[in-house]
Image (spheres, rainbow, N blue to C red):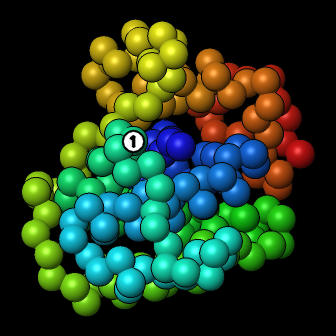
Amino acid sequence: MNLFATHYSPLVSAHNLCDKHLFSQAKEGVQMAVSALLIRGFDPESMPIAQSTGLPHKGGYRFHPATQWCSLSKKNWLWNWYHTKEIVAEIDRRFGKSHQSDIQLEVLIHLFLETVVEWPLEGLTPFARCLNQSKGENTDLLEWDCPVEAYREFYNRDKAGFAKWTGRDPPTWWRGMSATA
């Protein structure tokens, strides 16, 4: 579970994801969006249908810092929604495949727009930093002023062993040795 905020634009941040992260991030983005709405008091029965169970989606990772970040403000939730929606589009561009998350995202945006609930904060808040610090790694990145720069450095440190981009150049900040597939 993560939300790799490598750019302030949710769309550019989605484009920056390597191939391996696209499919997992599409699924996790929906899980965070569902969990955030449930945290805010949305009706559990109104959630999109989960492909695995055929029942309303229960979300996931309710207490994860990225999920908690999504639940803090409307702008945070929308950033995640646009990010996940663009990830689904990126899957189609790179691999010519659709993803179940696309249908779920449409249900979620309608719920979000049609339901009035209180959100604790206004505006986009600083991104939660999920940089493997719970494993004792990358703790120095918690001190960096810019969360986007911290996520870029984390991606360079942690993902160089497998990162590749099909039909797209790696992000300009990428220092890894991977090639475009």
57, 111: nearer the viewer? 57
Q: Is residue 134 left or right of residue 16?
A: left
User: For the point 75% across and 48% down, which residue is it?
Assistant: 19
Q: Inspect this view and state whether residue 126 appears.
A: yes
Q: Inspect this view and state whether residue 109 appears.
A: no
Q: Can you give x and y, in whole percent of width and height, for residue 26 in the image?
A: 60, 61
Residue 136, placed above or below residue 154: above
Q: Can you give x and y, in whole percent of width and height, for residue 95 in the image?
A: 83, 65
Residue 122, placed above or below residue 163: below
103, 156: nearer the viewer? 103
Q: Pointer 1: what residue?
A: 64
Q: Can you give x and y, in whole percent of width and height, for residue 128 in the image?
A: 33, 37
Q: Can you give x and y, in whole percent of width and height, for residue 14 in the image?
A: 56, 54
Q: What element does badge 1 sit on?
A: loop
Q: Quadrant of the C terminus?
A: top right
Amino acid at the residue labelled 1: His
Q: Toward which corner of the image does residue 114 lie, by quadrant?
A: bottom left
Q: Toward which corner of the image does residue 43 lie, by quadrant?
A: bottom left
